[in-house]
Amino acid sequence: MITKTKGIDDFPNKIIESGKADMSGLRKIILRILPKAKKIMMYGMPAYEVEVEVEEKALAAINSQKNYMFLYACTEAIKYNKELLKGLSCGRSFIRFKSPDRLPELTIVNILKDTDCICRIIY
């Protein structure tokens, strides 16, 4: 679902109240692991891009829907961490979860670090 927002700073206003704190926590983790990341809107959701070589590449994105939150990352990083993601709903490049309790911070950190590393090698 694409969220219609005016920009990255408007996104929290579009999230249902119960998910705001969780999404805020997820954003803080991303910015701690990717401190040079630039916040952008991509496909209607907050994304975080970094400069790789001379281009900027989106490394992660987050979204919130009525019952789920999503962390989008590099497909290879999700495959690589499949053991840590057992029991979670994963697609090619996303992890779907109902609350951050279901996705431990250490797992998020590993996926973000692996995504950063893999994307720097590929690009």
Image (spheres, rainbow, N blue to C red):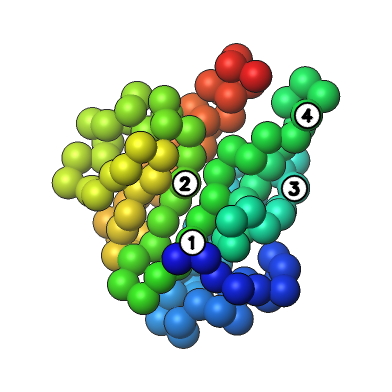
Upstream in sequence: badge 2 or badge 4: 4
Distance of label 4 from label 1 (alpha carbons): 24 Å
**Mark 4 nearby-residue class (10 Å; few <14, some 14–19, many ≥20):** few
Distance of label 2 from label 3 (alpha carbons): 16 Å
Q: Do labels 1 and 3 touch, CB within 8 Å? A: no
Q: Do labels 1 and 2 touch, CB within 8 Å? A: yes
Question: Which secondary structure lies at badge 1?
Answer: strand
Question: Where does the image place residue 72, in percent across and percent down from the top left?
Answer: 47, 46
Upstream in sequence: badge 1 or badge 2: 1
Upstream in sequence: badge 3 or badge 4: 3
Q: Do labels 2 and 4 touch, CB within 8 Å? A: no
Residue picked out by circle 1: 63
Residue 55 is tagged as: 4
Residue 38 is tagged as: 3
Q: Check disc 3 and give the amino acid type.
A: Lys
Residue visible at 36% across and 76% down in the picture: 66
Residue picked out by circle 2: 72
